[in-house]
Amino acid sequence: MEAIEKAIEKAYQAHISSLYKVLSQSILSANEDPSEILAAQSRFKKGLEFAADVRQKARAAAEL
């Protein structure tokens, strides 16, 4: 089970890293447009919530 738990955590961390990169690129592309930056932040927050939900479901499925 330890290997499964580590794999889930590694996948979760990779997902968070990807979300951060997308946020960074979105803010850069926004050219200081406040509404675009807020939209990027909103998408990032939704992505974080989704990643946490998937992580929880994966842990439950693996009975961790």
Image (spheres, rainbow, N blue to C red):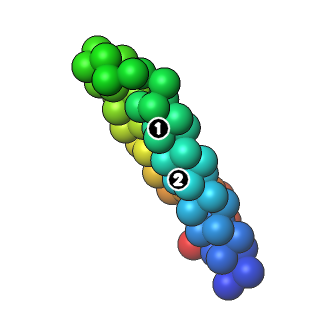
| Rendered position, 5 above or below 37 | below
Residue at the spot of label 1: 23
- The N terminus - image quarter: bottom right
Is residue 14 visible in the rendered structure shown here? yes
Distance from disc 2 to disc 1, alpha carbons, whole Å, reads 10 Å
Instruction: Answer with left or right where residue 34 lies relative to residue 59.
Output: left
Q: Quadrant of residue 28?
A: top left
Residue pictured at 68% horizontal, 84% vertical: 2
Query: At label 1, which amino acid type do we have?
Result: Leu
User: Image quadrant of residue 41?
Assistant: top left
User: Would you name the residue on which mark 2 appears?
Assistant: 16
The secondary element bearing badge 2 is classed as helix
Judged left or right of residue 24, residue 39 is: left
Q: Amino acid at mark 2?
A: Ile
Q: Is residue 54 visible?
A: no
The reply, left or right, for residue 15 in relation to residue 1 is: left
Circles 2 and 1 in contact, beta carbons < 8 Å: no
For image coordinates 26% across by 19% down, the residue present is 34
How many labels were placed on the picture? 2
Where is residue 22 shown, x and y percent of the image? 54, 38
**In the displayed image of the protein, which residue is found farthest to the bottom?**
2
Q: Earlier in the sequence, mark 2 or mark 1?
A: 2
Q: Position of residue 40 (x, y in %)?
A: 40, 27
> Who is closer to the viewer here, 54 or 34?
34
- Frontmost residue, 44 versus 64: 44
Give the answer, above or below, for where 45 lies relative to 17. Answer: above
Camera-side residue: 9 or 56? 9
Residue at (41, 42) in percent of width and height = 49
Q: Residues within 10 Å of mark 2 (few under 14, many from 20)?
A: some
What residue lies at 64% left-to-right and 74% top-to-bottom?
A: 5
**Secondary structure beneath label 1:** helix
